[in-house]
Amino acid sequence: MKKVNLFLLLLLPLCCMAQSLQLKGKVTDAAAPLAWANVVITSPEGKIITGMTTLEDGSFEMELNKGTYNLKISFLGYNDWQKEITMDTPVDLGTIVVSESANTLQQVVIKTNKKMVEQKIDRLVYTVDNNAAAAGGDAINAMSTAPGLVVQNNAISMLGKGASRVMIDGRIVALSGEELISFLKSISASDIKNIEIITNPPAKYEAAGDGGLINIILKKGASDSWKNSTTLTYDQNTYGSTTLRNNFLYNKDKLKFTVSGTGKSGNTQSRQDLDTYYPGGLWELKYKGKQKTDHASGRITADYALSDRTSIGAQYLGNFNSPDSKDKAVINIFNTGKTLDSLLINNGRNKQHSNNQTYNAHIISKLDTLGRNIAIDVDYFTFDAKIDNRFTAETFSPDTAFLNVNQAARNISNQNINNFTIKADMEHPLAFASLSYGAKVSFSNSKGAIQYYNTISGSPELDPNRSNTFEYRERNQAVYINGTKKINDKFNVQLGLRLENTQTEGYSQTLNQNNTNNYFKLFPTVYLSYTENDNHSFLFNYGKRINRPGFRDLNPFRAYLNSNSYSEGNPFLQPSYNDNFDLTYTYKGKLRTNAFFNVITNGYGVVFSSNAATNTQIISRENYFKEYYYGIGENYTATIAPWWQSQNLIYLLGSKTVFATNIQAVPMNKMQVYLATNNTFSLNKQTKLQLDYLYCSPYKRGLYEYGTVSGLNLAVKRSFLNDNMQVAILFNDIFNTTYLKDYTSVVNGIKQVYNENNSSRFVRVSLTYNFGNNKVKVDQRNFGNEEEKKRTEN
């Protein structure tokens, strides 16, 4: 009952609608109606109350409370028209004729460069178009160039944070790990307008994820225009791959839609090394695989303005992958005298197919001219994957003489995930503050199955003890309220509170094991901004977050990766919680000093351990630590010269970790230095040069030790045919030093050192051609499109 009362309390502002009266009129000149004239209402003291622009027929309508106001109508090239009005009853001003100014301005041309990075009270906004290195690439390439974002080892994170959740136009992508990386590779960088980096997300967004949110804003297209963009890209590393993308945007009158598609074909190489120091001697694993990059994806969006205040829309995203691979892993087995005893060679073929599809329908309505808006979204997401992994492990003597077949098997696994979500968001400006509030209900279902066949005899035999079906259900209900208040010209406050109620249930068929969990949590957020003047400003924010285990992390069954390695989930995993504190000082909008302090409680993660008796590697998941993570950094973004834009950052990071008693390991903590510089040089009007470099020092954090990572990228982009065609060349990771290396842990007294390089060094050549009608006819613009523009800013 308390939960119901709290829910009703949060929704009370919906009932606070003040009585309003209608004001309307029509603006013309001596010959015809004036569209897009500014109509502004101010108080007698001069404070702006509301405003709008006239429609195509010159008319306007707005709602005002009772009182006395000043009305001002203005339009470029015309004299201002002003009048004092008293609203006791509805007012119709009839036809208002404005006269031309004696000094009419014939033409104005404004030319400016987009800001590369913009700091807002609750997020950092990064403009992708400015980066030549992202040309011809995908969303992963674009995110790799964003300040403070790190893409490595199938994880996307922010400096000082854990793995980050990703949104597309404000909608959460219900994927993680390899599936998320694959999905983002299907989105063209040229389709991305901005990337929003939200370290402490406001109460409006889900509380899930310890690494903040990354919101990818896709381009919408200019009003009254159509545009087509085609990109052909070729990547060359050890192998080659070709990508063809096409994006069509149409925006006319009340209708706006986009259609885009991507197809990619080719191969890439993956290399992995793992040294395991068993008591009986070193096991040295070297893996090399050739993996297909084949995939196809598509996106369709449509929005229609039902009226000047209400629009409806729908969106579809589809992604289809077939990353088949040929794998070979060679394990050199040494004795205690460091002499080679034998070789274990795993050969395998891994056939994979996955697809994910996202559907959205939404309605956005402006309730009145005072700024009250409501948006309702219905989303459905589905993910299907099938993996058919066949491998044979053979033992050889040191002189490569065949000894025996150690193991031969076929693993067939299926994963199906679907999620249905409905949410409503309300914007409600009041006299004392601007409120936003809403509610969300989400239903998630996951079903995974593994069939393990022993093929050592030549005929496949199902092993029921190594086969399993795991079902998982999750239900989440949430309500939130968020308030923003401008105290004065210098001080702004934003406070939020989100309540989430979650129920989970997991069932393992083979183990006949059922696990349930229910929890109800509050997640507060606080944002404070203080601007002393144009030179000095301060931002402080605090947020509490929850990090829920992934579906696969909860599956208790063992999935065998090869003959001496298996991975298993943990159905008893509990969520971890983060308390994040962040302080930023900005000087002249160019130099940002950032300090943060994060506390992770009940932290969980992957634990790499080994069984010395059987020489088996075990990959498990545990709630095993509490961590204090902190750092301080400098960010400098500036136009150093008219031809040189530079974005630079350097951070000093540290941690203190405490392990649970059941983990047979000692925490490792060592400071980390991270620096990056991204520089765009305009060689001339048509040519840009991009030079990027990053460096990460060796460091220790918790269970793991990390080696040095550095990388140098060079890109050139040149425009032709009045900027309608662009050619770009990217040399990525020139010295082949960006990959994960010396990833070390010591558990149960056994040391493991891991390296992974998935073709980080490559050359990309891309050709993009744009054509269409980008001219905007002012007299044909439709004011209903403003609602969609506002939606992209939230």
Image (cartoon, helix red, strand yellow):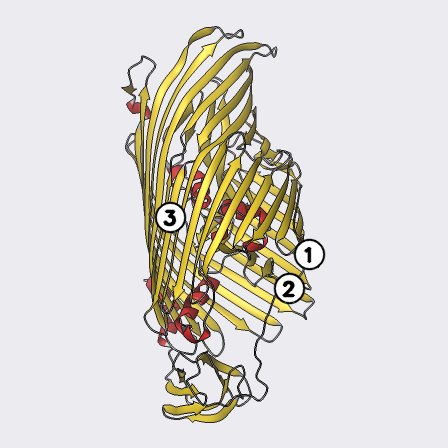
Q: Label 2 is placed on what type of residue?
A: Phe
Looking at the image, which residue is at 49% across and 74% down?
Answer: 433
Q: Label 1 is placed on what type of residue?
A: Trp
Q: Nearer the viewer, residue 266 or 785?
A: 266
Badge 1 is on which residue? 643
**Residue 84 position within the rendered picture, expressed as x and y whole percent measured from the top left:** 48, 93
Q: Secondary structure at mark 1?
A: loop
Looking at the image, which residue is at 64% across and 54% down?
Answer: 595
Whether residue 660 appears in this view of the structure is no
**Which one is earlier in the sequence, the residue at label 2 or at label 1?**
2
Q: Secondary structure at mark 3?
A: strand
CB contact under 8 Å: marks 2 and 3: no
Badge 2 is on which residue? 538
Q: Nearer the viewer, residue 230 or 545?
A: 230
Q: Is 380 placed left or right of 481 in the picture?
A: left
Between circles 3 and 1, the one closer to the viewer is 1
**Which one is earlier in the sequence, the residue at label 2 or at label 3?**
3
Q: Label 3 is placed on what type of residue?
A: Gly
Looking at the image, which residue is at 42% across and 72% down?
Answer: 781
Q: Is 277 placed left or right of 588 in the picture?
A: left
Badge 3 is on which residue? 298
In space, the residues marked 2 and 1 are separated at their CA atoms by 30 Å
In space, the residues marked 2 and 3 are separated at their CA atoms by 42 Å
